[in-house]
Image (cartoon, rainbow, N blue to C red):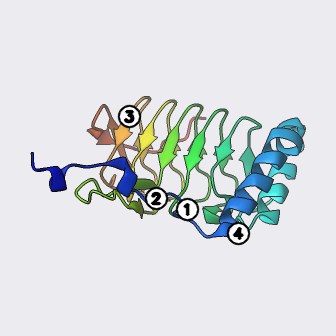
Amino acid sequence: MEPFLKQTLNYCQQFPYPRKDYILRMIWRLIWFSVWRICWHRVNFLRPLILKCFGAKVPLNSMFFGSTWIEFPWNLTCGEYSAIGPRVHIYNLGRVSIGDNTVISQDAYLCAGTHNYNDPKMPLIKEPIIIGGSVWICAGSFIGPGVTISEGAIVGARGVAMNDVPPWTIVAGNPARPIKKRKITFSE
C-alpha cells in the first residue's frame, strides 16, 4: 500500500467536541459516580430529574437503573413509562430517541456514533437512533448508528440490529433478521 494511503492515527482529530462539552461530561461523570448511583430505585423520578438538569428530554415517570450509563444526557429523549434496565449503555454521540412504554433490558448497547473508515483522519460520524413506542430491546442487544426500531418491534436477546426494524416485527441474531410478526393478545 502506498504510504500516503495508509491510515495513521496521528491524522485523527484529537478533540472532536467543543470545550464546553468536555466540561459538562466531566461534571456528568462526577454526578453519575455519586448522586446517580445512590438514588433509591424505588423513587423513580430522581434519576429522570438528574437527566433533566443535564438537558435530557425525559418525563419523570420513566425509569433508569443506577448502573445505566448515558454518554451525553443532552442527546437523549425518552418517552413516558419507559424503562432503561441495569448496565444499559447509551453511547449517544448522536441523538437517541426512545418512545413511550419501551423497555431496554439489561446489558443492551445503543451506539449512535461511528467513524468514516474511508478517510485516513477517521472523522466521527454522529448518527441518531430512533426507538419507537412499545418496543422491547432484549438483554444484551446491540443497536447500531442510524438505526430505527419501529413501533412495537422486538430485538431478541443478543441481537445485533444494524438496519431498521419494521413495526411489530420480532428480529433476532447477528445480524438481526425477522423471525415473525408480533401479535398482542390479552390474557384473562
Q: Are marks 2 and 1 in contact (CB under 8 Å)?
A: yes
Find disc 4 in the rendering and name its residue: 20
Mark seen at residue 159: 3
Q: Residue at x 32, y 47 (%)?
A: 162
Residue 183, percent from left and from top: 40, 44
Q: Is residue 40 above or below residue 80?
A: above
What separation in Å lies between label 2 and label 4 (alpha carbons)?
A: 24 Å
Q: Earlier in the sequence, mark 3 or mark 4?
A: 4
Residue behind mark 2:
129
Whether residue 30 can be seen here: yes
Measured from the top left, where is residue 58 in percent x and y?
A: 72, 62
Q: Residue 19: where, in percent of width, then height?
A: 66, 68
Q: Earlier in the sequence, mark 2 or mark 1?
A: 1
Disc 3 residue type?
Gly
Distance (Cα) linking label 3 and label 4: 36 Å
Q: Which comes before the other along the chain, label 1 or label 3?
A: 1
Q: What's the amino acid at mark 4?
A: Lys
Q: In which quadrant is the C terminus drawn?
A: top right
Mark 3–mark 4 contact, CB under 8 Å? Answer: no
Gap between marks 1 and 3 measured at Cα: 19 Å
Q: Which residue is mark 1?
A: 97
| Mark closest to the chain's N terminus, 2 or 4 | 4
Of residues 169 and 120, which is closer to you in this image?
Answer: 120
Amino acid on which the number 1 mark rests in the picture:
Ser
